[in-house]
Image (cartoon, rainbow, N blue to C red):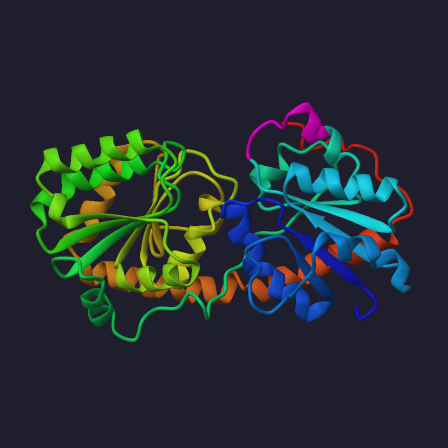
Amino acid sequence: MNDLDVIIPNLHWNYTGVTATNRMIAPRIARLASARWCGPDAPDGIETMNFSEVLTLPFKGRRRIVWHARRNNEMMVGLLLKWLGWPFRLVFTSAAQRHHTWITRWLIRRMDAVIATSDASASYLKVPCEVILHGVDTVRYQPPKNRDAEFQISGLPGKYAIGCFGRVRHQKGTDVFIEAVCRVLPHYPDFSAVVVGAVDDAAFEAALKARVEEAGIADRVRFLGERPIDEVPLWYRRILIYAFTSRNEGFGLTLLEAMSSGNALIAARAGAAEAVVTGGQIALLVPAGDPDALAAALETLVRDPERAAAMGERARDYVASHFSVEAEAEKIAAVYERALGRKTLPPPAATHNA
């Protein structure tokens, strides 16, 4: 693929789950093709380019150019440039598990290839697509050599921690997590809880902190806000149990990050949780938006930390063998090749019309 240029746009100024996904896969794509990142938050391992450099690509004798979008605005920019004569093949990755707006549907129909991150996401698409589940960087997200020592670095009280990472908001189920730990932690003084993520609504966070105060565990529940990108893997190594609490999600990459880090996982049935988690030996599944179910699942693990640690070890082994980010990159590269070889766009599919 040495004659192939891949442009990976990241046309969003806030750090989001889409950005995290892009950052994970982009360096692997760069090992397979001449790939460059356009936008903020570029990861190590891939060259960057500004938009003026994008505009010069057609004049450098390279005619095999893929523009890989993950957002509406990125599809719009790629489509506009293609209409103006840039020799782009347009690829779009869809993680959404909802009915798309008319403008999104219109844009997707004009892509040369479409990738869905799960069967659930594919079910909302009305064009042919290929399902490619996300992978995870098992080197970046790996278990600590000594979790007790890592916990001591955290400064949290007790012996163990439960974590919930992601933007602090209703959609992410941060309130479900707080309600569950408020019911469980008073009975288990060895455990603390930590929330890592940017705050979208100060009033929402204030209500969560008030609930923690009411439960009498304010000294054992920490709201850390948004942390530097390189600090997040360290927090996975400091916790024993990870709670994925989203009410709805495109995929939920933190599922894989937590499992790869050797955390015992309790996951709401949202995003790709059911596709990733195959049974209670590697994780526990609970209904989305249900603090009672989450509290019950948490209690089964906090009362038996050794069971939680063993579950985390099995989760790590499972992710390492089934969800390699390198394998994901190879599958995406194969989609690029098929898109470049396609003469015309496919008609809308009769399947995936749910």
Residue 104 among those drawn in magenta: yes
Residue at (31% x, 71% y) in the render: 144
Considering depth in this image, is 36 or 165 the residue closer to the camera? 36
- The quarter of the rendered structure image containing the N terminus is bottom right
The picture places residue 317, in percent across and down from the top left corner, at 41, 67
Query: 282 or 45, which lies in front?
Result: 45
Residue 7: x and y in percent read 72, 56
Q: In which quarter of the image is the C terminus?
A: top right
The residue positioned 59% from the left and 66% from the top of the image is: 326
Give the image location of residue 256, x and y in percent: 44, 56
Q: Is residue 30 above or below residue 158?
A: below
The range drawn in magenta is 97-105
Q: Is residue 181 visible?
A: yes
| Residue pictured at 8% horizontal, 52% vertical | 189
Q: Quarter-wise, where is residue 74 in the image?
A: top right
Q: Against 148, is 125 above or below?
A: above
Q: Which residue is most to the bottom?
A: 145
- Hey, which residue is sitting farthest front in the picture? 52
Please tell me which residue is depicted at 87% across the width and 54% down the height of the picture: 341
* Residue 162 among magenta residues: no
Considering depth in this image, is 6 or 296 the residue closer to the camera? 6
